[in-house]
Amino acid sequence: MAEKEIKNILVVDDDPVQVRLLNGVLTENGYQVDVSTEAADGLQKAMSNQIDLIILDVMMPVINGFNFCKLLKSEDDHKHIPIILVTSRDEEEDIKIGLEMGANAYLTKPVNSKELLRLIGVVASMEDTH
């Protein structure tokens, strides 16, 4: 199976420090990064731009990361976009919910940049399962 090429990554997180950190790591590693600090804006960007991967915070106001996953994965034209959830919530039940809602991987904060880059590679090699 051929690995999906991931070039364009959307970071959706309401924490500006986290956004800067993720943006820095990703751009240093050759990715094109778009950011959104609100889930509704992130959904719009995901649905109107060529996005290869979404890195998504779970704990956000109005639309949390779980609901973001559910909404995006309910759209036939966009359900193929892989999602890595990044959050401080690390309970087994939270991880299970995230994966059931359509996330492809789950990473806890504080983000380890090597683990993030490894997960991007893992997600790129996954078959579409959602």
Image (cartoon, rainbow, N blue to C red):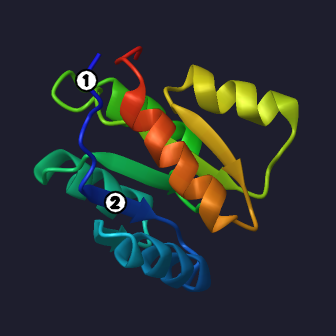
Q: Which residue is mark 1?
A: 2
Which label's residue is closer to the chain start, 1 or 2?
1
The quadrant in which residue 81 appears is top left
- Residue bearing the label numbered 2: 10
Q: Where is residue 67 shown, x and y percent of the image?
A: 51, 38
> Would residue 20 be found to the left or right of residue 40 on screen?
right
Residue 64 seen: no
Q: Residue at x 73, y 33 (%)?
A: 95
Left or right for 124, reference 101 = left
- Is residue 86 shown to the viewer in this render? yes
Helix, strand or loop for disc 2: strand
Residue nearest the viewer, comparing 66 with 113: 113
- The amino acid type found where label 1 is placed reads Ala
Q: Residue 123, how many percent across, how many down?
A: 45, 35
Q: Nearer the viewer, residue 60 or 12?
A: 12
Residue 94: name its quadrant: top right
> 85 above or below 7?
above
SS class, disc 1: loop
Q: Residues within 10 Å of mark 1 (few under 14, many from 20)?
A: few
Q: Is residue 70 above or below residue 113?
A: above
Above or below 92: residue 91 = below
